[in-house]
Image (tube, grey):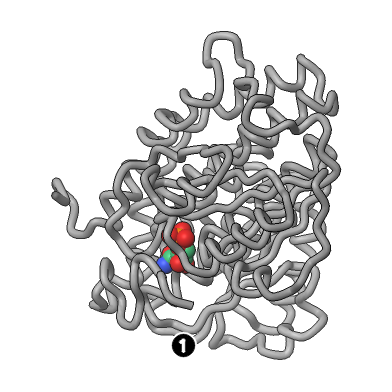
Amino acid sequence: DKGNHRHFMEKEIYEQPEVISHALSHYVDFAEHTVRDMAAEIDFANLRGLAISACGTAYLAGLVGKYWFERYARLPVEIDVASEFRYREMPLSKDQAALFISQSGETADTLASLRYCRDNGLKIGAVVNVKESTIARESDAVFPILAGPEIGVASTKAFTCQLAVLASLALAAGRARGTITEAEEKQLVKSLAEMPRIMSQVLNAVQPQIEALSRDLSKFKDVLYLGRGTSYPLALEGALKLKEISYIHAEGYAAGELKHGPIALIDENMPVIVIAPFDRFFEKTVSNMQEVAARGGKIIFITDEKGAAASKLETMATIVLPEVAEIISPIVYSIPIQLLAYHTAVFMGTDVDQPRNLAKSVTVE
Ligand code: M6R
């Protein structure tokens, strides 16, 4: 049932504040502002490293997770798409754990990677939506994302719920390893707890502007997304979302890679979507944006109030979000990314929930 929505994808985008709140309540204590102890599931304190593997959007959630585990838990993360991971013959040791992320829990390559790690004696954790799935069944510890059924082929609420769970796991690991203080944990969990309210606010605030902008975006054949830090995986996710449902060719790049190649493509025919909250990377990303502007590139700037005030560049559009804590920015910034892909596809008249050539669950290699 789509309720009042035109597509399941739209419904699932709008469900996010509610499902994230539900997912978080499973992993954090909202009253105490602490994260649940997960030592019984994974002994984070004694791990030397974590291997993460997944496909598509789930892989991109894992890529954000890598930044968090390394920053908050000082835990080295090895991550790869499952179709490579399973064949890389990666040396693994028993003091590493492995984490598999999958909405369906049935993705063939992810399952094969899981079995490879299990055969190497690693402890297996699964971040899944479907709790009765094969991946969940074959794991030692299951971390449900509690997003509810996701019908749209383009993943939206599963992505942000995966992020919410990964953030909680990274903080649990940080506490277990003594790499975040009690005060830091409280502050970070407070930021997580604020997310549902901020997401609702953003959904309402940006929708009209993004719908109007999508009309312009639909005229282009190629789009480039740029971001740094956790905004880099988000740039990849933005490009994936746009290409899968609107069929516009889109690429995501780490902003710092711009001058190592993609800058050659910049002209007035390829809009560049820059994801840049006013964080410790902002200045660097803005200097990349200047390079785009100097070559006549059109910029769609997704930032916050401080970022909008700090940049004097002319843009095709500036989407202004509230200022948020760094840990929640990839989740909050998912909303404009998803809405932009969604409205562009609707405008182009594609089959949004069932895009051509794609399946919701990829059970063959
Ligand atoms: O069910 P899974 O999470 O394992 O699926 C992984 C990918 O197939 C999936 O995320 C795919 O990339 C989506 N269509 C993205 O929107």
Tag 1's secondary structure? loop
Task: Give whichever of 107, 11 is nearer the camera.
Answer: 107
Residue 219: where, in percent of width, then height? Answer: 39, 83
| 241 relative to 112 in the view: left or right | left
The answer to whether any part of residue 132 appears in the image is: yes
| 26 relative to 34 in the view: left or right | left
Tag count: 1
Ligand 1 resides in the quarter of the picture at bottom left
Task: Give whichever of 43, 241 is nearer the camera.
Answer: 43
Mark 1 is surrounded, within 10 Å at the Cα level, by few (under 14), some (14 to 19) or many (20 or more) other residues, namely: few
Look at label 1 and name its amino acid: Lys
Residue 187, quarter of picture: top right
Task: Check the image and report above or below for 1 versus 179.
Answer: below
Task: Give whichever of 277, 162 is nearer the camera.
Answer: 162
Residue 47, quarter of picture: top right
Residue 175: where, in percent of width, then height? Answer: 76, 24
Task: Give whichever of 350, 287 is nearer the camera.
Answer: 350
Residue 305: where, in percent of width, then height? Answer: 60, 42
Q: What residue is drawn where x is 30% and y is 57%?
A: 9
Residue pointed to by mark 1: 221
Task: Check the image and report above or below for 228 versus 125.
Answer: below
Q: What residue is drawn where x is 48% and y is 25%?
A: 26
Task: Check the image and report above or below for 214 versus 1.
Answer: below
